Image (cartoon, rainbow, N blue to C red):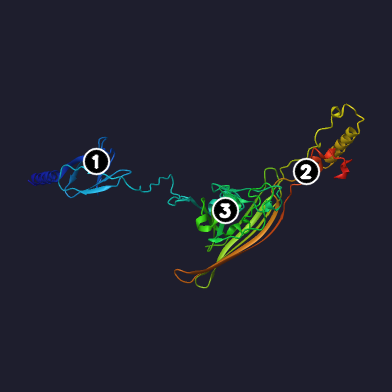
């Protein structure tokens, strides 16, 4: 008897459930009366759903009072409450803007700001160190698209500053900020055939690398906000203002040619000042030796004089003079193989320090100050020319022997 009652109740409940559900069908079209295929039709709060076919038709089981959402990429979603009608046709309007969809293969935070009208890169100090370089301008060259900086050889004092710019528009058109404040340009004018010849730029070696928390790079013009020196873009160096612990880093390296040895050590730490203040201190010592990729000077100053050029006359005074010139200079160059110019990175020693102090005054105001000091010694090489490197020197009448110009 109990079994019969249970079966009867189950049958009644199933019948009631089936009676409460009904089918809704219809066509989904756009504003031009064209069917929209692939529209997602989902009953809210359930896993029940379907999609429209190629002709925009759909059929779905619902209950009275259910809310059904119609959505498709490029169209504004529509939600309808079911009122018992068996037919529901809809017209979907085109969406004015699409929701941002980010698909990524990992959980890492994107480096570039994607919702900005201009490209902005936020480079952490971890990424900068991951480049394997030891100077800020070199780190940025390996991590930021369109940032250009390279060591300049045989360029006088320019070799100590490494001209840097964005998008190849020149150092004087790239604005560099530190904590949002303009950095002063150096007084060194870039010389010879270096990037930004005749311009001045920012010395990115004027502060310790250990003071950098992150670097923001705006890779587009911002002259409307900052002025003409921001035509190429803006680089904002964010300084460390706090530290959970003190940190000391060391590095050393040498080139595959066995020259250019470099080593450095830097420190960063922070201390509390009063109840709220923070003082971050950074120090750095860096030293590098020269590199030379010029090779040895040629063993001869050109081609030996050809007697045919002198009418075949070996007694010609010009032939005798030029032959003697060639032989003497060749012997001198063989005795002094290091007389050629040095082409490579300069010798450099840098000692720098930076202090960054912040003290909150209220929720909306803060007292801050930061100071940096740098002492640097360098030895670079100029583009010098010896007279015997020019083909017309040996023809000069005032030169009779190589000692005249050595």
**Could you classify mark 2 by the number of other residues whose Cα lies within 10 Å: few (under 14), some (14-19), or many (20 or more)?**
some
Of marks 1 and 2, which one's residue comes earlier in the chain? 1
Dividing the picture into quadrants, the one containing residue 332 is top right
Closer-to-camera residue (367/226): 226
* Front label number (1 vs 3): 3
**Could you classify mark 3 by the number of other residues whose Cα lies within 10 Å: few (under 14), some (14-19), or many (20 or more)?**
many
State the CA–CA distance, disc 3 to disc 2: 36 Å
Dividing the picture into quadrants, the one containing residue 25 is top left
Mark 2, residue position: 340
Question: Considering the numbered disc 1 on the image, is that residue within a helix, a strand or a loop?
Answer: strand
Residue 125 seen by the camera? no
Residue 195 seen by the camera? yes
Mark 1, residue position: 28
* Name of the residue lying farthest toward the left: 1
Q: Position of residue 253 (x, y in %)?
A: 66, 49
State the CA–CA distance, disc 1 to disc 2: 81 Å
Specify the label residue 174 is tagged with.
3
């Amino acid at each position: 008897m109990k079994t019969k009652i249970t079966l009867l109740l189950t049958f009644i409940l199933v019948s009631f459930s089936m009676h409460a559900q009904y089918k809704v069908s219809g066509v989904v079209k756009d504003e031009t009366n064209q069917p929209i295929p692939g529209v997602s039709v989902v009953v809210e709060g359930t896993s029940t759903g379907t999609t429209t076919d190629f002709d925009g038709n759909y059929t779905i089981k619902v209950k009275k009072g259910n809310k059904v959402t119609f959505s498709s990429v490029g169209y504004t979603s529509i939600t309808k409450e079911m009122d018992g009608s068996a037919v529901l046709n809809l017209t979907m309007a085109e969406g004015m803007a699409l929701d941002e969809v980010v698909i990524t293969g990992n959980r890492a935070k994107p480096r570039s700001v994607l919702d900005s009208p201009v490209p902005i890169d936020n480079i952490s100090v971890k990424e900068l160190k991951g480049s394997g370089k030891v100077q800020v301008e070199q780190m940025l060259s390996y991590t930021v698209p369109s940032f250009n900086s390279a060591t300049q050889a045989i360029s006088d004092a320019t070799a100590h500053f490494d001209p840097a710019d964005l998008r190849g528009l020149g150092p004087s058109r790239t604005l560099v900020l530190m904590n949002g404040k303009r950095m002063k340009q150096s007084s060194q004018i870039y010389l010879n055939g270096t990037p930004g010849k005749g311009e001045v730029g920012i010395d990115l070696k004027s502060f310790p690398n250990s003071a950098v928390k992150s670097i923001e790079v705006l890779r587009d013009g911002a002259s409307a906000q900052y002025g003409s020196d921001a035509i190429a873009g803006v680089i904002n160096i964010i300084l460390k203002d706090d530290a959970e612990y003190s940190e000391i880093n060391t590095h050393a390296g040498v080139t595959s040619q066995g020259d250019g040895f470099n080593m450095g050590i830097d420190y960063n730490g922070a201390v509390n000042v009063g109840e709220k203040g923070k003082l971050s201190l950074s120090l750095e010592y860096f030293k590098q030796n020269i590199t030379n990729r010029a090779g040895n000077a040629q063993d001869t100053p050109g081609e030996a004089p050809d007697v045919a050029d002198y009418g075949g006359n070996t007694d010609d005074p010009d032939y005798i003079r030029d032959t003697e010139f060639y032989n003497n200079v060749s012997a001198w160059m063989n005795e002094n193989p290091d007389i050629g110019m040095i082409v490579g990175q300069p010798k450099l020693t840098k000692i720098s320090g930076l202090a960054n102090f912040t003290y909150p005054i209220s929720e909306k105001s803060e007292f801050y100050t930061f100071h940096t000091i740098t002492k640097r010694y360098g030895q670079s090489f100029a583009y010098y020319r010896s007279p015997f490197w020019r083909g017309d020197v040996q023809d000069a009448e005032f030169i009779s022997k190589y000692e005249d110009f050595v």
